[in-house]
């Protein structure tokens, strides 16, 4: 409403309402995140005030921020498209098809600010890092690895996690990482696959993952035997 009133005032009586109307229009446009248009109105002011200078400085800062975000978005899209190509060569499909509409884990960080995603390992054009979460269902606990280098084995990663006893393991069933059983549940299915912990993440995904659209690769970690394992297995069909 304020913007329309200012524009109407400029149309009906531009001389007497010039500065006031342009300032009101600029203030309204700034609140609508239309920073360049706000600057255009401020540039028409005959006499600038402290308030108009403050709005002008803030608008310029926001335009600079938007430009940086746009540049970052373009970089992220290019990386995401390269990741898609690498995964496609491995037989892993992304969710949808448009090269300009990179979705799910393959979307630009700016579209899902701060969310983990598959990306390239440092100084590598072919090896990836994946967001992985290890789930311990008997306790409702988990460990999240934001950048799991696919060249690492699960056994090594779990050994690092359990270098010290987990404080939540009150029954002491997660004692020896070498004895843990690791499972992957295929999305939308009741079938689980037991995973050899000596495999690297790259070997595992190449064998089992054909469509990756869940955001984070979730793996279940169970003790080698006992009630916790039995209770978990009853929720699924026989493991493959």
Image: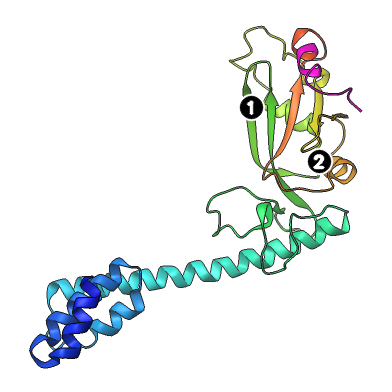
Quarter occupied by the N terminus: bottom left
Residue drawn at the location 68% of the way across and 20% of the way down: 137
Task: Say which quarter of the image contains residue 44.
Answer: bottom left
How crowded pointer 2 is (Cα within 10 Å; few <14, some 14-19, many 20+) is rated as many
Q: Name the residue beneath numbered marker 2.
A: 201
- Asked which secondary structure carries label 2, the reply is helix
How crowded pointer 1 is (Cα within 10 Å; few <14, some 14-19, many 20+) is rated as some
Q: Residue 142 carries which label?
A: 1
Residue drawn at the location 77% of the way across and 60% of the way down: 84
Q: In this view, does 153 lie above or below 100?
A: above
Picture coordinates of residue 218, whole percent (x, y): 72, 35
Q: In this view, does 233 lie to the left or right of 171?
A: right
Task: Say which quarter of the image contains residue 219.
Answer: top right
Secondary structure of the magenta portion, mostly?
Answer: loop
Which comes sooner in the sequence, label 1 or label 2? 1
Task: Say which quarter of the image contains residue 150.
Answer: top right
Look at the image and give the residue range highlighted in magenta: 230-240
Picture coordinates of residue 36, whole percent (x, y): 35, 79
Residue drawn at the location 86% of the way across and 24% of the way down: 237
Closest to the camera, between mark 1 and mark 2, is 1
Picture coordinates of residue 102, whole percent (x, y): 67, 62
Q: Are marks 1 and 2 in contact (CB under 8 Å)?
A: no
Q: Is residue 72 left or right of residue 188?
A: left
Foreground: 8 or 86?
8
- Asked which secondary structure carries label 1, the reply is strand
Residue that sits furthest to the bottom in the current view:
15
Quarter occupied by the C terminus: top right
Picture coordinates of residue 58, whole percent (x, y): 28, 69
């Amino acid at each position: 409403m304020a913007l329309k009133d200012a524009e109407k005032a400029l149309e009906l009586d531009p001389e007497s309402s010039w500065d006031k109307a342009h300032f009101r229009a600029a203030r309204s446009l700034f609140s609508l995140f239309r920073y360049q248009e706000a600057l255009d109105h401020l540039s028409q002011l005959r006499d600038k005030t402290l308030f108009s200078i403050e709005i002008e400085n803030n608008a310029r800062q926001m335009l600079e921020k938007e430009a940086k975000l746009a540049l970052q978005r373009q970089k992220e899209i290019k990386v995401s498209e390269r990741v898609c190509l690498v995964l496609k060569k491995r037989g892993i499909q992304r969710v949808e098809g448009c090269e300009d509409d990179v979705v799910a884990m393959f979307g630009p960080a700016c579209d899902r600010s701060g969310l983990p995603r598959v990306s390239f390992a440092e100084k590598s054009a072919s090896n990836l890092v994946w967001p992985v979460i290890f789930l311990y269902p008997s306790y409702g606990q988990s460990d999240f690895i934001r950048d799991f280098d696919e060249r690492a084995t699960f056994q090594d990663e779990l050994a690092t996690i359990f270098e010290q006893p987990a404080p939540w393991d009150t029954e002491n069933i997660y004692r020896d990482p070498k004895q843990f059983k690791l499972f992957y549940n295929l999305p939308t299915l009741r079938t689980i696959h037991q995973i050899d912990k000596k495999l690297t993440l790259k070997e595992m995904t190449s064998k089992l993952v054909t469509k990756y659209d869940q955001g984070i690769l979730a793996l279940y970690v169970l003790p080698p035997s006992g009630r916790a394992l039995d209770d978990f297995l009853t929720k699924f069909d026989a493991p493959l």
